[in-house]
Structure formats: C-alpha cells, structure tokens
Amino acid sequence: MYTADPAFWRAGAISSTAVMLIVLAFLTVDSLATIRPGGANVPPYTVMNKEIRYEYDSDAGRDRPVIGADQPLFGRTHSAEEAEALAHKGKLVIQSRNCLNCHTFFGNGAYYAPDLTKAWLDPAWQQVWMPMTQSDSREKAMVAFLMNPEKYPTWSRQMPNLKITQEEAEALVAYLKWMSAVETNGFPIHFGHIQTAN
Amino acid sequence: MYRSQQLALKYFTAAMVLFGIMVVAGLLASAQYVRDGFLLNVLDFSVNKTLHIDTMIIWLLMGFMGAIYWFLPIELERETEGIRLAEVMFWVFCAAVAVVAAVFIFVQYGPSNDTTLWLIMQGRKYVEAPRWAAAGITVVVLVFVYNVVFTAIKAKKITGILAVLLVDLVPLAGLYLIAFPSITNMSEDLYWWWWLVHLWVEATWEILIGCIMALALMQLLGTTRRIVETWLYIEVALVLGTGILGLGHHYFWIGTPSYWLGIGGFFSALEPLPLLGMVVHAVYDAGAHHMKTSNKPAFYWMMAEAFGNFLGGGVWGFMMTLPQINLFTHGTQWTVSHGHFAFWGAYACGVISVIYLALQKLRAAQEMNGQAWRWSFALLNIGLIGMVGALLVAGIAQAFFERAIGGSTLYAFIAAQSNEWFVQGITMRLVFGLVFAAGYAMLMYDLLSIGKRSLSGETLRTRATGSAA
Amino acid sequence: MTPAEMVVTSLLLGLFVVLAGCYGVLFCVGRLRANRALLYAAYTAYGMQAAVAASLVLSSSLGEWWKLLVAASCAVYLPIPPATWRFLESLHQLKEQDS
C-alpha cells in the first residue's frame, strides 16, 4: 500500500511546500507593488499635505480613506523629499521609543495603549487636547502631547515621557497623518462612529 | 554522555532561567493593567512586555537547540562536529542576552537615529534587540546549523528526520535576517516582519518541534523510526501546505491587497486539520502503550503538547481567523489569549517534555515519577488555561465595546478598558498568572530533584506497593 | 454583522473545532477500548459539530463563500479520525511484521 511508504508522503511534503512557496512568491511581488508609497493602497508621503477623511463606501461595502483638498501640515506644504525625510524620521522615532510595545499600528503591536492606525482622525485631538494644550491646530496639540504626555492625561493609565524632541514629535505626527490614509480593507470598522449592540 | 549532550543540558538550564524571567516580566506587565501608574517611568509596560516576549522566544529557541544537541549524537552515533565552537557560542549567546536585557531595563530607548538601532533598541516586536545583538544571534544560529550539517556530513549518514531538520534550518536561519532592516513604510515593514514571525512560529518552528517530538517519541515510547518519519512527512505536508499561505491571515488589514482576505482566511481555516491529526496520533500512542512509560512527566507533557497545540492554535485561532470576525478581534486581548495558548501548547510543553527525557538519561533513573511533577503540571496548565480564559473574556469585551460598538477611537478604547467584563478578565489574568508562577517554581524544584530520589522513601514505597506514587 | 452577532458567531466557530476535537478523541479512545458507548459519544459529538455548522450556514451573517468553507470543512472533518486511525493501525501492523 503506497500510503504506508514514507517516500510517498515525503514527495507530498516536498510538492505541497514547493507549490505554496511559488504562489507566495507571485503574491509577494504583486503585494509589494500595491503597498509601496504611490501604489494602489498606500499613498505617497506627500499625502501629509492633504486633508484625509475615512468614509463608508457603499460600492466597496467598507470604510475607505478619502484624500481631500490641500491641508498644509504645520503651516507648510512639504516637497516629496521633505515628506519622505519626515516619514523616515517619524518611523525612527517609533522604533527608537519602542512604541509597538504599548500601541498597535494597523492592529499590530501591544494592546496596553490605543491603536494608532487612524490616530490622526481621532476626534479627541480637537475635542480634548486642543483646548487642553491651548493649541490652534490638531498637529500642534499632538506635538505638545507627545513631548509632555504627563501634562495632558485623559485617563488614569498614562503615557510615559519618552523624551521626544520637537523635531521628533513633528516627524511622528507627519507619519501618523500619512498612515491614516493607507487603505486597510476597512480596518478599523466605522472609525469614530458609535453603533448599537444588536 | 557526549559533549553535545552536556551542552544540551546547559541550553536547557539557560532556557529555564529565561522562562523564569519571562514569568516575572509577565507578572509586572499584568500588574500594570490592574494598577494604574505601577512602575510608570521606571519600568514602563513596554519594557516589561519586551522582556516578557523576547525571553519567551529565546528560551524556546534555546530549548530547541538543546534538544537537537541532545539527540543529534544519538541519531548519528558520533560526537557533534564543531562542539568546542558550539560550547563557546553558548556563552556568547548567554552574554549577549544578558547585555541586551540590561540595556532594555536600564537604558530603555534612545534618540531616533541609527546609533540607537545598532546599540539600544530596534523597536520591532520580538526583534527589539539592537542590531549588534541580532548579528550575534545570527552567528550563534549559523554555528548551530554548521554543527548539524557537518556532523551529518562527517557521519556520512542522514536519516529522514535529520533531512527534514536540515532543510528546515535553512529558512529558519534565513528568515531571521528580517530582524535587521528599518523600513520607513509601515505596510512594507509589517509585510516582511510577518514572514519572520509567522513563517517561524506557524511553519519552520512547527517542523522543528515535529522533528524533536519524532526523536523524543522514539526514546520515550520506542516508536519505530518508520512510523515517526512517515508521520513527520505528513505533518510537514499539512502544516506547510496550510501554513505558508495561512501567512495571509496577517495580511488582512496592513495595506495589502484584499485578495489576502480570501486566501489568508481560507488556508488559515484549514490549519486546525493537521493539529486534529496530531491529537488523534497522541491519543493512539497513549492508548497503545496503556499510558505506561518509565518517564511519566515526559509523556504527560507530550500529550499536553498535542492537545495544547490543537486548542491554543486550532480552536482559538479558528474563532478569530475569518476576516469578518477578525475585523473586530484584530489587535485585542483576544489575540493575547490566542497567543499565550498557542505558544504554550505548540512549543513550551514540547520543550519541557524533552528536558524530562534528558534528565532521565542524565540521572540514570529507571523511572521518572513523583508528586512534584504532577503539581507543577497541574499548576502550570491550570494557570495557563485560567489566563487564557480570562484574556478571552477581556478580549471579547474589547472587541465588542471598543471595535463593534465604540468605533475604535481613543474614547472607545478607554470605555472598553474600563468595562467591568474587561476589568474582571484582566484581573483574573493576573491571579492565574500567579498560579502559573507557582507552577514554574514547582517545575524548577522538580527538574532539580527528580530522578535523584532513587534511595528516598518515596520511590522505595512505590516499588514495594507496585503502584505509581 | 452586529456586535452581538460577531461574538456569537466567533464562539460558534470555536465550538465547531472543539467538537471536532471531541469527536476525534472519543473516536480514538472508543476504538482503543473497543467501547461502543464511546463511539456513539464520538458520533454524537460530530452530530453536534454538524449542528453548529448548520446554524452558522443558515443563520449567521458570514459571507456565502465562508459558509461554504464551514460546510465543506465539516464534511472533511468526518473521515479524519477513522482514516487516521486506520492509517496508524496499518503503520503499527507493519512494524509488528518487521519485528
């Protein structure tokens, strides 16, 4: 009976692995093209100069990012090189301060602190932090909070002070703004809108 | 005893020490959920969590390496090639881990530049260690691969199990290179990061533990080579056949194309099938031997491995893997519940089982039994299942209140974290964590003493009455 | 999918696999001990698994392809324990023949 022969199953192991790896390779090439900045799902870093919204698209059956009119960040319109440099710096801040071990990005990381996928769009910046930090813009409120989170708590679990400089905080805010414009297949669902249980 | 086996014992010791550090760090992090402000700005949650998850990965890796160093000379009937270098690399590995841990605790973070990435913190989950340490680990792993490969070459012999192991070590080592780059684009960073994490724990590690369990079964139950080999090939076919594209279940929401929802969800939903096969196999083995074995703890931990893998990986995973559900459960305590259960069942139980096997040989004990192993087995598993259940309650509350109802904003997050179900769950998690910690202490006591008690009253009584203690 | 449906659906999905596990274990132990009661219990577990699958297919808000997957995998789970058992027996019999 050939099923009792280990060689039969060895052949099965080799062939199924090979087939799956080949499929993965093809899908990787396609996915990488989709997720590069400027690809189908990920906007170029210069989207930080635009208004970003997140709205339900009934044709697609999910929430999707919507890029709107010009909306300078920190009062400036950043060139492609400047935007990329800011994003690069912002990502270095995230890594150097180990943000992923309290927060999540696209739901990946740790769950002690909020998910930051759509943090740029969180109503708390306008409703709570702009008055608290006496800032006249969302991004300035974000920078003020990041530099001194202990001064602007919103509940009893606090963010530690990670000695984030002004330059780093601005880069991080720019990064979060860009990130909120990534197409995530509808995650998180109906961001900012409260539903009923049933 | 071969020098390779003595090295294995060192790796097992280091693994158990790191297991203890993992428990302490876990308790601290759990306490930070229950008590606001606990160790804030001293040892922040991110520090404790980093220590917790990194010591887990390293202790399991050390356990695997120890198991291979243990079985390799038996398989090939000769000393491991390059054993002296391997012995040196063990101490290098331990030193690197100690330095990295010290930097995590006392330095914690640095400015946003490459120097920080090289010396202090890389800040990507599980691979937070600075690049110099990642380089060190790469060298340690390469020496390990060299040991295995060249022992086989020098022995001019290869077995089916070793062949699978050798092929598996290549991607296992290669994937670790993903720990090095710093990619600005978070989507791309996570795309590759998931190759490392998923293709380790849901592919190459599954094969590795499969090889180790095959080698262990031959020792523990005298199962024939042909049976364990056949089973190993079937396992590889099913685990990789489902797991390679099951990688897609991490590609639902990170910016990748929407076809991953279908592909990832479909293959992920098939992942429990090989695990059910393993449970059937485990029950068969247990029954065929009428639960009689000279090493009860090794046997029970191996059973725990099969069941834990199925429940933690298969059941808990299936609950949350369909994209329509995952949209709500993604990145919540539900994930934590699944992660704890799956890592425990799939890997920790297996490593503990092998350590008991090795100890039997080390202490030349005719029989490995007693009360202490039963207590530690009960406390660890009850503690773990308790934590998992508590986290499931908290996770369901979070998915329900923060995501489904609340709209995932900061205030939705706060509302869910403050919800009474969540608070109950997260508090009970700490309680069961303490039970687990007690189990760990018991395990350490038992590992240090089991098999040495051959002249103690306990075993004499056992032999006299003819029943197990 | 409403929040309440989400929780119930995911718990049912988990229960689906738990029952598959119960079926497998009960079947195995039933065969090991040649105990008919245990075998009946095994098939009862499978029956419950099929009932869970049916409720997911008929009443949940899962997409149609996912419902098909649930139904198909329920069908696939049925022969796994008996087939694995037969296979293990034949492997072990060959071992007896060898030794």
Image (cartoon, rainbow, N blue to C red):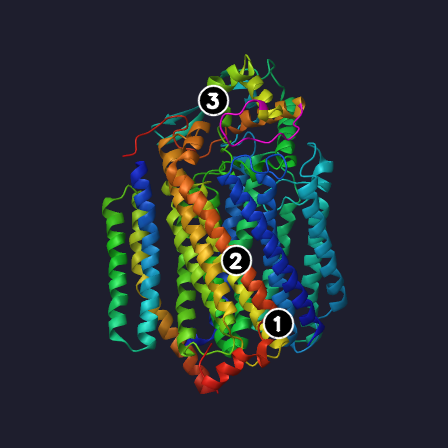
Residue B443's x, y, as percent? 55, 63
Pointers 3 and 1 in contact (C-beta within 8 Å):
no
The residue that mark 3 highlights is A124
Q: Quadrant of residue A145?
A: top right
Label 1: state its secondary structure: helix
The span from disc 3 to disc 2 (Cα, nearest Å) is 43 Å
Q: Amino acid at mark 2?
A: Ala
First-in-chain label (1 vs 2) = 1
The residue that mark 2 highlights is B438
- Sort mark 1 into few (<14), some (14-19) or many (20+) by Cα contacts within 10 Å: many
Residue stretch rendered in magenta on the structure: A151-165
Query: Please, which chain is the residue tagged with disc 2 on?
Result: B
Which residue is more in the foreground, A115 or C73?
A115
Q: Is residue A37 left or right of residue B92?
A: left
Which residue is more in the foreground, B168 or A146?
A146
Do callouts 3 and 2 point to residues on the same chain?
no
- Sort mark 3 into few (<14), some (14-19) or many (20+) by Cα contacts within 10 Å: some
Of marks 1 and 2, the one in the foreground: 2
Q: Is residue B118 above or below residue C96?
A: above
Quadrant holding the N terminus of chain B: bottom right
The residue that mark 1 highlights is B71
